[in-house]
Image: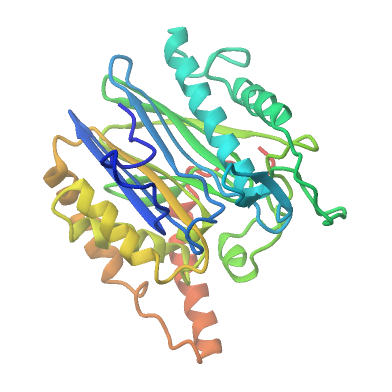
């Protein structure tokens, strides 16, 4: 089962470019959704998020892609109607295609390697990098640009993906990433946990919110890049998700992102409504394109999913996490951020890979 890349439309209706889209699906212990918004409709540099699940084998893939607009601002592709898109816009969509082909190859190969049998197998990050490199190398870059310099990249994009497989009561997962998009686990008893570590020189998550440091590694066509990987397993039920920084980079603290996820979940009657509430919560607040892909695994229905996190939301909402100081009180804001981050940090980083892993 794959969430379609765009909603169905009548044949006589012309293709439009809305500034946001949501998708959802529910099937036998799986609740899945994806949210995608553009700050400039028609020119957003986040590719549409990817959410795919193969029923017969229990394999799934969640992935997001954020074209790096600063280093990829040069023209990258000209559409048949004459519209020119940036190199970042193009790179994000090439990466999405490569990730989807990688997942289809995993399913078609029949290799049940979600517990990680080493490099060279169909589902390895090395194989994904090969798909990415092949497609990037095959992409013509015929649109000329006057933009040059050491910071320029050709077809640059981030990637954050979680490949998972359900095996009995376990959800075995591997997070793969490049750049500063992130993957997470959301667990009923302990909340939000980061599964990736941004490719920046700054390792502290709160400092990253305050500084927005430059990335040290992105997927691109003109130089080598690294795909980092980190694997583990959770007992079902659990929630896995991947998001670009438009979702988590415009809150005051990392805990606020969890609050957004849980508050919108508690207000929703089904997974489609949860997707729409997430979109309405984030789009007015973010200053960027934003995309998110999520799968809730092992919950019998949406009511059980919502009930499983009611206690966690009560705990986090009852603390200091939502007592945001006024924007003009900079000293108060900084002190509140420091206090809440220190209280939240240990649980948030529990499953995060080590520095340089």
Mark yes or no: residue 111 visible.
no
Side (left or right) of 279 relative to 155 = left
The x and y percentages for residue 229 are: 59, 32
Outermost top residue? 110
293 to 149, vertically: above or below: above
Tell which of 141 and 177 is nearer to you: 141
Question: For residue 343, which quarter of the picture?
Answer: bottom left
Question: For residue 163, which quarter of the picture?
Answer: top left
Look at 30% across and 46% down and name the residue there: 13
Look at 34% across and 27% down and name the residue there: 53
16 to 132, vertically: above or below: below
Tell which of 3 and 324 is nearer to you: 3
Q: How is the image coloured?
A: rainbow
Question: For residue 142, which quarter of the picture?
Answer: top right
Look at 57% across and 47% down and name the residue there: 81
Q: How many labels does the image show?
A: 0
94 to 110, vertically: above or below: below
The x and y percentages for residue 197 are: 59, 47
Tell which of 56 and 112 is nearer to you: 56
Mark yes or no: residue 204 visible.
yes
Side (left or right) of 256 relative to 88 = left
Look at 16% across and 44% down and name the residue there: 302
The x and y percentages for residue 196 are: 55, 44
Q: In the picture, which quadrant includes the N terminus?
A: top left
Q: In the picture, which quadrant includes the C terminus?
A: top right
The x and y percentages for residue 178 are: 63, 41
Outermost bottom residue? 328
Outermost right residue? 149
């Amino acid at each position: 089962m794959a969430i379609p890349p765009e909603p169905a439309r009548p044949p006589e209706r012309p293709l439009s470019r809305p500034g946001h889209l949501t998708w959802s699906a529910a099937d036998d212990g799986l609740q899945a959704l994806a949210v995608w918004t553009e700050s400039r409709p028609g020119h957003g540099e986040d590719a549409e998020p990817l959410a795919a699940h193969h029923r017969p084998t229990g394999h799934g893939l969640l992935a997001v892609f954020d074209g790096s607009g600063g280093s990829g601002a040069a023209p990258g592709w000209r559409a048949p109607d004459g519209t020119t898109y940036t190199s970042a816009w193009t790179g994000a969509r090439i990466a999405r295609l490569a990730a989807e082909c990688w997942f289809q190859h995993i399913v078609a190969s029949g290799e049940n390697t979600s517990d990680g049998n080493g490099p060279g197998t169909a589902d390895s990050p090395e194989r994904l990098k090969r798909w990415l490199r092949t497609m990037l190398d095959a992409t013509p870059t015929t649109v000329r640009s006057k933009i040059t310099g050491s910071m320029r990249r050709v077809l640059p994009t981030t990637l954050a993906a979680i490949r998972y497989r359900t095996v009995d009561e376990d959800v075995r997962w591997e997070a793969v990433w490049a750049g500063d998009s992130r993957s997470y686990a959301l667990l009923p008893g302990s909340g939000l946990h980061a599964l990736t570590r941004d490719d920046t020189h700054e390792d502290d998550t709160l400092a990253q919110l305050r500084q927005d440091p430059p990335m040290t590694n992105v997927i691109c066509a003109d130089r080598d890049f690294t795909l980092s990987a980190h694997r583990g397993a959770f007992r079902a039920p659990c929630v896995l998700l991947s998001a670009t920084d438009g979702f988590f980079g415009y809150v005051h603290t990392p805990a606020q992102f969890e609050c957004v996820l849980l508050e919108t979940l508690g207000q929703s009657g089904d997974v489609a409504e949860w997707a729409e509430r997430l979109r309405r919560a984030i789009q007015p607040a973010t200053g960027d394109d934003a995309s998110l892909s999520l799968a809730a695994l092992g919950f019998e229905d949406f009511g059980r999913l919502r009930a499983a996190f009611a206690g966690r939301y009560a705990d986090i909402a009852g603390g200091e996490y939502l007592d945001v100081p006024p924007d003009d009180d900079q000293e108060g804001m900084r002190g509140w951020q420091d206090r809440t981050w220190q209280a939240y940090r240990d649980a948030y980083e529990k499953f995060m890979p080590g520095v340089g892993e």
